[in-house]
Structure formats: structure tokens, C-alpha cells
Image: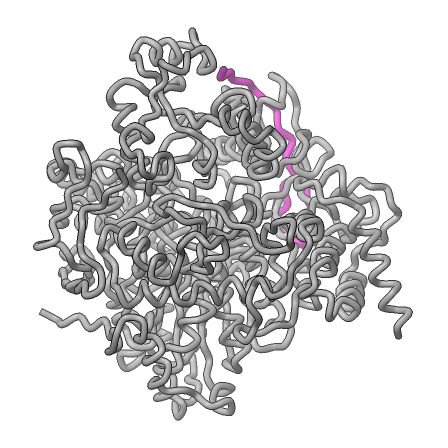
């Protein structure tokens, strides 16, 4: 049943990449517990516009948990306190009436802040561009059923491929490591016969690009897996390490 | 009246595409390097086109409003992608996919285009598998299929409930590969704000950098619009928040015809609306109708008790449930096409049998499927959808039926294109949801992914060469030309005007008003009186917007309200054209239901003798009535019949 709650929000405001940031405190009233966290932010922004102030900049798009655009570090967790959800799927029933909620951007060397809660995740695209694909052009490929793939491998590849590229793993990691993201793509393609052909080249190039872009090292704390909204497993990191070592041995 | 030439190739239906390819002009590799192609949008159509054109050797400039091409709304497609592979040996063929698509579209699409779509559907699956898309497989290692609405065969390929995501990532990776090879110049967080026409041909675009606010000029020998549909005209839809119709609308304002704007798809299985603060509607995949059974209580008093919270759906005995789709349409049952399922839900709710607090919901029940197959099987098939439902509604669909209601989902209408996917402006192409082709008045489930990728991987890369072959001597043009200058000035003035209004209402406030008018009068059921009222109301909203919108901040730097305002200005005009087109089309076809034209049983009544045409609207200037041109639809290979899913 629908209930409403009042909240105090401490939100990170920062005018630009080089500007000094600060927390600002806002109050929102009569928020339906059936609304999503972003809908609550919409209400706050509407309030700010009515007061003639600039609304809070945040990234969002599909609002159904798949595009990976929304971010926000809420009460110390990427995508907030609920499990297996993105911020757009986090609902206000997870908060208590009168609670103070702290909202920050992703904080990591790899993701510079653009404004308020918006960050630049361009580094992820660059890592994919370095090798996160099968080098095949359109046309001239065999029939889709020409190469059988065991259901187990296909399912495991799909588990890895479910990554939405939101960057929660990096935000959760004390080292700001992008290993979960990178390993998910390396794993998906290494598990499938189509991707095996260039697996060594792929692992080396993606890891090199990740290192170049300022992401930290993995120290196996597992925080990334816990905060991943899609439950991508750290076994992918182990697989990537094997892929990388095998590639290096061949050199 | 201008003659509309669809350029359908000669020859028998099954030979048309082959004949076209055999006779079209090509561009040699050395010349490809000298030709620039602008692709606006990086969804399935845009990303697959950009990647394919770049692989061929063209210089591609790719634009997206998102921070990454991977975010495009194609990513949210859940259920699957159709192809005529006939792997399950259940009688499928290219012809049958073609036939189902024409029939599903209520005979308002072109035979030639649709046949080509069915023909290349198989190539798409091959291509995606080669890219490493992890489609669902059987234990033997071969690809799995499931069935979708409007078909009696299982031709839908899928990757759990995330097929759109996996296909988009495949296309995105191919695109990023070409970025790495320096064949694609990628512009993220960049929005098209104008199209530049030089000597009657599309030669470039003006964009706004969404971070710096700077207006930028880009030249292309050809421009491809792949910016998706205009469903967000309704404010509430299953589209992403950023999805908008502005790029297509700029094309229209520059002279490209806009076709069948009234053809909008209302998806039957969405999570019902729950409050005024709501920002979007969430789709529950049509694939759920494979195993879920749709029902409402048979007795009005039961429905009322449920609405008041006195009864639960599980309290209603089997004999007191009305499985109305199975009752009305025994041959297709729960798998009737989307328009039919949506209208049937509305009919039951309007008659007082709706459930949920608002009475605007019906049940989608998995109890029988769970009893028959076990919870594990259902979880493997739909686990992510069930989880999403539970997060939003806070109810467990394994234990209690889901509540669903129709919502705006997809726009079949869009920029008019000929067989070559070229709009009525030479050099301006439109692909994917942004164009009008292939789906007629109603799109079948799992066909949007098919069409987007067909256009991008296998159609446009051929047809655009036929145009560019005549352009190989055209050097790259300077963006200092007066045509660029003039368009940039126009855009700058528009933004200044928007910022200077400083009125009372936020953009969303006005957009919600528009949405209510659209849903009430240009939604699931339309009539003459309502549409005329809608036209009046939309004009009022337009006036109010230009007099009373409030946009804080400046034109330079990030200004999210300015972005939204600029898109809303176009949505208002799109809404007006939709109402105009719906008023003109005095028949019911597919997603367009005119209450005046229905059978005694309440089914859609088409009027083929008068309306078997594509309505192509030509822009005549601000506040001037657009002119209608008709492209007659000729059916040589299928017989026009009343759709029957009984």
C-alpha cells in the first residue's frame, strides 16, 4: 500500500570538473514509497526549478535497470542500499520517514566528475575499443547453427555479458579497479568459440588500456561483486587473470 | 499532387532485392575513403550502420546524446528477435515471416520492403552469433527459439530477457572496433539540432555539445537519421527518458515527408501507472505471454472487492476467472498481436472488470505454467523480468499474478523512406524506428530488433552506395559555407528565445499536460470529436509553452532543462501531426483504432478501398497546415483480409 515519507537529502554539488564541490542539504516532503529514487530526485529538481535554482545534474535514461546510465553513491553504496538494482530501480520503500540520505557521485580516478552527480565514464568505451569484440565484419559469416556451443558455456557467457557498464564496481572498489568490468567482457568472449581465436590479443590489449587509463589494481576484496547491480561474479576476474597469464606466456 | 515514388524494384517479389543488388551502383574502395557519412544515433540501427559502413571503408561520423553508444534504448528490448530460420522445423519460411508481418501490420506496409526484411532476417542471426552474442541454446548446443504474438511458429531468438542489450552490445562493440581503427569519429553527449541542406541535398548537421553547450558544424556527403521513435510525445511511455523525436522532426521541417504519424504501438503488458510523480512505464516482455495467462474476474463484485483490497487474486476460484483472450481468440489465445491484446484489456477495464487500486489493470498469471513446468524452468526463462517486477511493485509474481496494463511503446510511423531508405530529401536517409517502413499499422513482437539490424547491417550499406556513387567527385565541403552559418544562427536564436521566456512552469509540467491530452484523445481509442479537441488543446499547450516555460541556467555548459525544453517544443508539434493524421484516417487499422469504425464484435474495421495508402505529410512552415500526399499500397502477393486471430 502506498505511504508517503519525508526526507532530508545531503547532495554533492559541483559546478564543473575543476570546481570545488560541496554538500548541500535539501528537504523533500510527501514522497510516495512506490516511487523510485530517481522520481524522488525529479520531485526535488522540480522544487529547485520553482525556487529559481539550478536543478541537480545526474545521468539517467532507461529507468528500467538496463542502460547503465544512472549512477549515484547513496548512503555509502553505489546504487544505494537495495541489492541487485540500479538507482533507477531503487524504490523509496527502502527508506524510513525522516531519514537523512547522502547522495554522491561515483568517485574514482578513472571517472572524473563532470557536474554534480554526473561523471565521465568514457574510459569504459576506450577499454572496449582496445579489444572488447570479435574482429568480424558484416557479412560472410557461417550459419548461426554451424558451430554448436554447449548450453553451459552459452549460459556462463550470458552471465558475464549481462554487465551494463554502469561503473558501480569501480565506485565500490577502494582501489578504483575496473577488473570486474573488463573481466566480464574478456570472459564472455573467451567462453565462446567465436571469441577464442583472438583471446590472447584481446586480454592483453584490454588490460593494457585499463592500466593506462588510471584504474587501480585488484586486491580481491570482492566489493565489486557485492555492489554489482547485475550480480556479475568475481570468478570472471580469475578467468581473466588466467587468460592474461596464458597470453603473456605465449609472448 | 506530387507523385510519391517508392522505387520498389521490378520483378517477382522474391527476386526484387536480388535484382536491386545486381543492378545498383557501387563505390570503389579508393572513393569510399573520400566520402563522409554522418550517422545520428547509436541504437541497433545506427550502431550497426556506422560499423558496417566504416568496415566497408567509408569515413563515418557517429553521434549520440548519451555518454556512450552502449546506452541507446534498443538496450531495453527484452524478448527477442525474429528470423525465418525454421530451426524448430515448424513450418516457418521467408514467405511466412513476410506474410505474418504484413498481416500483423494490418496491410499498411509495402510488400517489397517487408519481403526484403524477412529475407535478410536470417543473416542477422548469423552475424550476431559471429560477434559473440550469447543467444539461448539447447543442450545439444544449437540455438533455442520461442514464440511471440501474431505467429504460429517459434521463430524468436533470445538472450534471456535481455536480447536487445546483447544485440546492441554486439553492434556497439563492432562500432568501437571501427573507432579504434579510426574509421569512425565518435561524438558522445552531442545532440543534432539542425540539418544542413545545400543545393537540395543533405550535406551536414548542426549539433549542440551537451557538456559545453557549444554549437558545432559537421559536414557529410550523406546524413543518416537513426534516432528512434517519438513515443515520448505521450510523456509516459516505455521509452527511455532521453528518447525523443527531434532529429526526425528537424528532417521533417527541412522538407522530408513524415509518414503515418498516427500509427503508435500500445504494448499490452506494462506495469500499470501508479501515481502523478511517475516518470516512465516499465515493460514486461511479450515473451511472458508464452506461459502467462491473462484474466480478470468474471464477476463485477469480485473485481470491485479486489480494487478495495478485500479480496486477493488468489481468492478467486478458477471458474470465476475470465481468460478473455483465450475466450475471444481461441486460435491465438494469449498470443494475439499487441494491438488486439491491448484493446481487449481496455475493453474489460472500461466494462468494470479491471483490477488493482485504479481498476486499470489485468492479471498475467503464471500459476499454471509453474505447476506444469516447475518454478525453476520459469525462473530460467523469465527470472530477470520477475525480479524487475518485484523491485517495482513489491509483490512476488511467483506467488501472486502480475498486474499489467497497456502503455505506449513504439512508433510505427516516422520519416517516409523509399525502398533505398532514403527520405524525400536526397542524401538524407532514415533507418530503424526513425523511419516508417516495414511494420505498417502494428509491429509484431521481436520485429523491432530485426528491422533495426536489417536496415543497419544489410540494407543501408548497399542502398546508400547507389546514391553516393554519383557523389564521388564532390569534395568535402567547408562548414563555413553560408548554409551552415544560417542554420547555426537559427538554432542559437531558438535557444536564446527559450531561455528568455522565464515563465511559471517547468518543462516536465507542460510535457505532462501534453501527455494527458495525447493519452486521452490520441491513445488506444480515438474518435473525430476527441481528435478535434486534441488539436485545439495541443495548440493551447504550444502557446503556453512558448509563453510560460521556465528554464533555469544558461545556453553554455550543461543545461538539462534546456535540452528537455528543446525536445518538448518538437514533441508538441509531433503530437499535433499525430492527431491530424489520426483524424484523417477514417478507418481502424492496427494500433490506430477509430471508434466510429469497428465491427459489431468490437474488432477493428479497415477500409481498404479508401485508406490502403501511406499518409505522407509535407511541412509547409510554422503554423501552416501540412499537406497530405498519398502513397498507394499495392498488394500483388497477399490478399487483403480482415485479420482473424480466432
* Res. B604 image quadrant: top left
At x 60%, y 47%, the residue is A68
Q: In this view, does A207 lie above or below B603?
A: below
Quick check: is A12 in the magenta stretch? yes
Q: Residue B415 appears at what percent x and percent y?
A: 29, 62
Q: Residue B208 appears at what percent x and percent y?
A: 46, 62
Residue B253 showing in the rendered view: no
Residue A222 showing in the rendered view: yes
How many numbered circles are shown? 0
At x 24%, y 50%, the residue is B106
At x 35%, y 17%, the residue is B297
Q: Is residue B526 above or below residue B310?
A: below
* Res. B299 image quadrant: top left
Foreground residue, A217 or B323? B323
Foreground residue, B324 or B197? B324
Quick check: is B548 in the magenta stretch? no
Q: Which image quadrant: the N terminus of chain B? A: bottom left
The boundaries of the magenta stretch are A1-23
Foreground residue, A78 or B306? B306
Q: Residue B424 appears at what percent x and percent y?
A: 25, 71
Amino acid at each position: 500500500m502506498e505511504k508517503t515519507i519525508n526526507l532530508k537529502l545531503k547532495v554533492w554539488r559541483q559546478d564543473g570538473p575543476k570546481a570545488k564541490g560541496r554538500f548541500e542539504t535539501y528537504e523533500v516532503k510527501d514522497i510516495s514509497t512506490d516511487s523510485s529514487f530517481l522520481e524522488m530526485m525529479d520531485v526535488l529538481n522540480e522544487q529547485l526549478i520553482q525556487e529559481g535554482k539550478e536543478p541537480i545534474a545526474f545521468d539517467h535514461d532507461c529507468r528500467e535497470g538496463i542502460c547503465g546510465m544512472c549512477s549515484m553513491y547513496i548512503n555509502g553504496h553505489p546504487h544505494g542500499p537495495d541489492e541487485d538494482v540500479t538507482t533507477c530501480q531503487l524504490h523509496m520503500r527502502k527508506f524510513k520517514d525522516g531519514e537523512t540520505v547522502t547522495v554522491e557521485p561515483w568517485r574514482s580516478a578513472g571517472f572524473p566528475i563532470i557536474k554534480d552527480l554526473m561523471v565521465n565514464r568514457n574510459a569504459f568505451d576506450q577499454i572496449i575499443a582496445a579489444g572488447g569484440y570479435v574482429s568480424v565484419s558484416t557479412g560472410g559469416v557461417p550459419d548461426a547453427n554451424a558451430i554448436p556451443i554447449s548450453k553451459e558455456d552459452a549460459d556462463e557467457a550470458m552471465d558475464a555479458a549481462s554487465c551494463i557498464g554502469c561503473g558501480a564496481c569501480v565506485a565500490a572498489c577502494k582501489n578504483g579497479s575496473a577488473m570486474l568490468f573488463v573481466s566480464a567482457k574478456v570472459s564472455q568472449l573467451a567462453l565462446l568459440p567465436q571469441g577464442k581465436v583472438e583471446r590472447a590479443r584481446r586480454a592483453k590489449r584490454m588490460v593494457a588500456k585499463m592500466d593506462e587509463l588510471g584504474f587501480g589494481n585488484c586486491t580481491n576484496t570482492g566489493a565489486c561483486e557485492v555492489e554489482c547491480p547485475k550480480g556479475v561474479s568475481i570468478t570472471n576476474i580469475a578467468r581473466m587473470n588466467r587468460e592474461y597469464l596464458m597470453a603473456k606466456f605465449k609472448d | 499532387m506530387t507523385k510519391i515514388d517508392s522505387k520498389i524494384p521490378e520483378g517477382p517479389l522474391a527476386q526484387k532485392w536480388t535484382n536491386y543488388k545486381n543492378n545498383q551502383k557501387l563505390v570503389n574502395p579508393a572513393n569510399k575513403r573520400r566520402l563522409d557519412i554522418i550517422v545520428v544515433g547509436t541504437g541497433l540501427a545506427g550502431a550497426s550502420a556506422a560499423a558496417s559502413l566504416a568496415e566497408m571503408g567509408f569515413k563515418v561520423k557517429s553521434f549520440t546524446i548519451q555518454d556512450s553508444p552502449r546506452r541507446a534504448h534498443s538496450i531495453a528490448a527484452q524478448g527477442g528477435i525474429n528470423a525465418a530460420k525454421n530451426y524448430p522445423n515448424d513450418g516457418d519460411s521467408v514467405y511466412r515471416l513476410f506474410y505474418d508481418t504484413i498481416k500483423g501490420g494490418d496491410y499498411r506496409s509495402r510488400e517489397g520492403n517487408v519481403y526484403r526484411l524477412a529475407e535478410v532476417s536470417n543473416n542477422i542471426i548469423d552475424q550476431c552469433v559471429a560477434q559473440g552474442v550469447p543467444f539461448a541454446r539447447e543442450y545439444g548446443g544449437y540455438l533455442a527459439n520461442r514464440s511471440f504474438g501474431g505467429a504460429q511458429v517459434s521463430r524468436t531468438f533470445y538472450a534471456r530477457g535481455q536480447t536487445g542489450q546483447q544485440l546492441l552490445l554486439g553492434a556497439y562493440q563492432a562500432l568501437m572496433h571501427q573507432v579504434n581503427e579510426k574509421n569512425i569519429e565518435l561524438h558522445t553527449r552531442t545532440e543534432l539540432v539542425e540539418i544542413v541542406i545545400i543545393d537540395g541535398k543533405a550535406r551536414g548537421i548542426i549539433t549542440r555539445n551537451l557538456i559545453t553547450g557549444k554549437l558545432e558544424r559537421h559536414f557529410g556527403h550523406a546524413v543518416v537519421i537513426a534516432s528512434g521513435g517519438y513515443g515520448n510525445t505521450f510523456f509516459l511511455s516505455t521509452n527511455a527518458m532521453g528518447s525523443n523525436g527531434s532529429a526526425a522532426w528537424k528532417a521533417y521541417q527541412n522538407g522530408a515527408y513524415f509518414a503515418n504519424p498516427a500509427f503508435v504501438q500500445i504494448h499490452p503488458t506494462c506495469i500499470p501507472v501508479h501515481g502523478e510523480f511517475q516518470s516512465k512505464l516499465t515493460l514486461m516482455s511479450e515473451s511472458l505471454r508464452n506461459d502467462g495467462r491473462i484474466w480478470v474476474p468474471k464477476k463485477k463484485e469480485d473485481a470491485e472487492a479486489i480494487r478495495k483490497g478485500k479480496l486477493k487474486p488468489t481468492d478467486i476460484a478458477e471458474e470465476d476467472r475470465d481468460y478473455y483472450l483465450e475466450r475471444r481468440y481461441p486460435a491465438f489465445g494469449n498470443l494475439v498481436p499487441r494491438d488486439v491484446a491491448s484493446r481487449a484489456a481496455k475493453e474489460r477495464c472500461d466494462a468494470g472488470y479491471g483490477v488493482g487500486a485504479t481498476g486499470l489493470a489485468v492479471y498475467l498469471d503464471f500459476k499454471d505454467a509453474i505447476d506444469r513446468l516447475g518454478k525453476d524452468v520459469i525462473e530460467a526463462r523469465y527470472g530477470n523480468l520477475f525480479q524487475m517486477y518485484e523491485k517495482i511493485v513489491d509483490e512476488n509474481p511467483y506467488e501472486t499474478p502480475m498486474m499489467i496494463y497497456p502503455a505506449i511503446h513504439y512508433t510505427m510511423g516516422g520519416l517516409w523512406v523509399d525502398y533505398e531508405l532514403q527520405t524525400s530529401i536526397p542524401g538524407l536517409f532514415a533507418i530503424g524506428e526513425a523511419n516508417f517502413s516495414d511494420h505498417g499499422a502494428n509491429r509484431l513482437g521481436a520485429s523491432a530488433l530485426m528491422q533495426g539490424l536489417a536496415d543497419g547491417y544489410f540494407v543501408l550499406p548497399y542502398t546508400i552506395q547507389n546514391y553516393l556513387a554519383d557523389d564521388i567527385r564532390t569534395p568535402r565541403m567547408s562548414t563555413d559555407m553560408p548554409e551552415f552559418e544560417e542554420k547555426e544562427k537559427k538554432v542559437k536564436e531558438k535557444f536564446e528565445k527559450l531561455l528568455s521566456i522565464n515563465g511559471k512552469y517547468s518543462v516536465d509540467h507542460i510535457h505532462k499536460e501534453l501527455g494527458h491530452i495525447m493519452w486521452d484523445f490520441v491513445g488506444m481509442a480515438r474518435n473525430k470529436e476527441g481528435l478535434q479537441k486534441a488539436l485545439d488543446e495541443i495548440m493551447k499547450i504550444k502557446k503556453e509553452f512558448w509563453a510560460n516555460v521556465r528554464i533555469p541556467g544558461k545556453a553554455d555548459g550543461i543545461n538539462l532543462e534546456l535540452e528537455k525544453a528543446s525536445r518538448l517544443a518538437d514533441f508538441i508539434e509531433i503530437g499535433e501531426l499525430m492527431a491530424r493524421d489520426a483524424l484523417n484516417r477514417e478507418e481502424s487499422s492496427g494500433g490506430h483504432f477509430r471508434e466510429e469504425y469497428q465491427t459489431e464484435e468490437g474488432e477493428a474495421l479497415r477500409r481498404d478501398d479508401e485508406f490502403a495508402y501511406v499518409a505522407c505529410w509535407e511541412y509547409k512552415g510554422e503554423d501552416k497546415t501540412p499537406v497530405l500526399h498519398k502513397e498507394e499500397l499495392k498488394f500483388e502477393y497477399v490478399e487483403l483480409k480482415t485479420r482473424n486471430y480466432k
